[in-house]
Image (cartoon, helix red, strand yellow):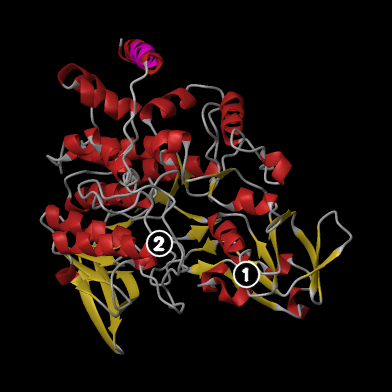
């Protein structure tokens, strides 16, 4: 059984791993190379080597109710979408609440993690660290790697003929901090992910002209969704997931397209995804359509060539003058302190069982936390991974034989789609609800909807039809939190409390009352169809 655990990184997943280790009676030591906790969410005016970087205006793309730790809700006076400074404050509150700081060694870089000579028997690791120029070595029974995958920028310059003779300036989005550098310039942003669209919108306020180049396109949705509610609280529910996973993929694709186009027709704005079968992460941006329709941002196809101080776009002979290019082209990832024989990265993914455990190790004493791209928040995802991983490290839960795990990893690499539901075919992509439920099953913490329906119908309806909030992960089993039920039942009240800062009395409407009654009867009918 593992006792001493090394945790690499004190970001979102590292803090959760620390807490899980302590709850299971283990002895963790966290190594953080920077001077403070927070990882990605700690903004600095400069880029720090080996640490994720964010720009000053970053706000969460998932709402606070969906992106909190499962037993630690955000303060009620925080907005529904949290600016990075307040998110860092939340992480500090979490660390203080569970007394995690004393287990963190700041300004300590992990140089190497190597198997000990007797690893096949002991499962132990030699961990070499560096603190203020002084090396140190220690033996650990287990290691949890929580370094994320947003530190190594992907800059495909070879795909842009002429870029090396470009007469302007170019940079990766990792280097971007504030829009001042765009003042009175003609700007090209390459890549239409969340960072690319954010930067294009910010540039449009100061620049002479902004081009946003995209090859694949993408669905653009606002944080403000149906009836003004946060998009993920409406979209991410067990009921919706069940319905979508039971329908053929072409029908699901059509439904998604219809919903995405209900706000504006993406084809008319040059944004429609090229491949609408393989699901691509939606772009969360509240302002892009407005910038396009007012001419502040011009959507363009891929760049064919860079010529001096101009660029030529695909299928367009015209040269467009450009002063500055921002490559929002994503990231690669690696584990420089680990030997390839432990974790090998190929084609944008690693051979990890359930995205956590190296499948080939004779002893499951190393876990990678947070190396996944779920269609949900990374905070509860990483926390749930850590809860299961720690129980495996401790010996409470066991893994299948290596041969079974390797087969599972290879099947996932093939990206075979069942033909039903959404198509998660890209590296590290995962069905959020399905994945979390799988881990909760291993832990013994997945709520039983049938049992809840018989004992607590109100809660059962909220769990099934309501948003898939992390509090559901604490209703039962190891780590049960007594406040989970109330947190679930009050989640909509807290959401509205953040926006209802001016109360206007509403006069009752008989039509509205009749519609609510019909809606309730329809809800009862759906419950009977699902559970009976």
Q: Residue furthest bottom?
A: 133
Residue 257 image offset from top left, x and y in percent:
61, 33
Q: Is residue 60 magenta?
A: no
23 sits left or right of 335 in the view: left
Secondary structure, mark 1, is loop
- Marks 2 and 1, how far apart in space? 33 Å
Image height of 26 relative to 158, above or below: above
* SS assignment at label 2: loop
Residue 227 horizontal/vertical position (percent): 44, 33
Callout in the foreground (2, 1): 1
Magenta segment, principal secondary structure? helix
Q: Earlier in the sequence, mark 2 or mark 1?
A: 2
Left or right: where does residue 179 sit relative to residue 299? Answer: left
Task: Say if residue 29 shows up in the picture.
Answer: yes
Q: Position of residue 30 (x, y in %)?
A: 23, 69
Depicted 384 relative to depicted 492: above or below: below
Looking at the image, which is closer to me, 135 or 380? 380
Against 124, residue 450 (above or below) is above
Q: Going by the image, does 97 lie left or right of 150?
A: left
Q: In the image, residue 400 lies at what x, y percent? A: 30, 41
As drawn, which residue projects farthest toward the right? 317
In the figure, 50 relative to 300: above or below? below
Q: Which residue is mark 1?
A: 206
Residue beneath disc 2: 148
Point out the stretch of residues depicted in magenta: 513-521
What residue lies at 44% left-to-right and 40% top-to-bottom?
231
């Amino acid at each position: 059984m593992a006792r001493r655990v090394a945790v690499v990184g004190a970001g979102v997943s590292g803090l959760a791993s620390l807490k899980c280790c302590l709850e299971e009676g283990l002895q963790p030591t966290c190594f953080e190379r920077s001077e403070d906790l927070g990882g990605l969410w700690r903004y600095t005016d400069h880029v720090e080597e080996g640490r994720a970087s964010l720009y000053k205006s970053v706000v969460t793309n998932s709402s606070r109710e969906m992106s909190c730790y499962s037993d630690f809700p955000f303060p009620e006076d925080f907005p529904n979408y949290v600016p990075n400074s307040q998110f860092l404050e939340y992480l500090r509150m979490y660390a203080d609440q569970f007394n995690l700081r004393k287990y963190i060694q700041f300004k300590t870089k992990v140089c190497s993690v190597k198997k000990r000579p007797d690893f096949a028997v002991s499962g132990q690791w030699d961990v070499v660290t560096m603190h203020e120029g002084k090396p140190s070595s220690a033996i650990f029974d287990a290691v949890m790697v929580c370094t994320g995958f947003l530190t190594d920028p992907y800059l495909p310059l070879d795909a842009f003929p002429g870029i090396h003779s470009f007469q302007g300036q170019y940079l990766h989005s990792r280097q971007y901090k504030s829009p001042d550098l765009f003042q009175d310039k003609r700007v090209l942003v390459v890549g239409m992910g969340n960072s690319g669209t954010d930067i294009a919108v910010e540039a449009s306020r100061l620049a002479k002209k902004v081009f946003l180049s995209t090859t694949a396109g993408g669905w653009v949705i606002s944080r403000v969704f149906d009836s003004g509610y946060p998009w993920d609280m409406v979209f991410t529910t067990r009921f919706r997931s069940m319905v979508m996973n039971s329908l053929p993929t072409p029908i699901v694709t059509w439904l998604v397209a219809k919903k995405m186009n209900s706000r504006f027709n993406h084809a008319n704005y040059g944004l429609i995804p090229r491949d609408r079968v393989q699901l691509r992460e939606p772009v969360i941006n509240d302002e892009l359509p407005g910038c396009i329709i007012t001419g502040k941002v011009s959507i363009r196809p891929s760049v064919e060539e860079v010529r001096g101080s101009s660029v030529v776009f695909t299928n367009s002979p015209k040269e467009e003058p450009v002063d500055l290019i921002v490559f929002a082209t994503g990231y690669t990832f690696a584990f420089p302190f680990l030997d390839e024989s432990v974790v090998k990265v190929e084609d944008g993914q690693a051979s990890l069982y359930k995205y956590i455990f190296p499948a080939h190790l004779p002893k499951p004493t190393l876990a990678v936390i947070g190396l996944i791209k779920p269609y949900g928040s990374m905070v509860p995802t990483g926390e749930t991974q850590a809860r299961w991983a720690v129980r495996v490290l401790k010996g409470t839960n066991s893994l299948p034989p290596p041969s079974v795990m390797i087969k599972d990893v290879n099947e996932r690499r093939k990206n075979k789609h069942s033909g039903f539901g959404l198509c998660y075919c890209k590296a590290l992509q995962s069905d959020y609800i399905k994945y979390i439920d799988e881990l909760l099953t291993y832990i013994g913490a997945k709520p039983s909807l049938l049992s809840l329906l018989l004992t607590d119908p109100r809660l059962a309806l909220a769990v099934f039809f309501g948003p898939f909030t992390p509090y559901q992960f604490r209703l039962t089993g190891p780590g049960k939190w007594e406040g989970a039920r109330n947190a679930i039942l009050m989640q909509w009240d807290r959401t509205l409390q953040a926006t209802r800062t001016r109360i206007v009395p509403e006069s009752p409407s008989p039509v509205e009352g009749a519609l609510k009654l019909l809606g309730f009867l329809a809800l009862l009918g759906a419950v009977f169809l699902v559970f009976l």
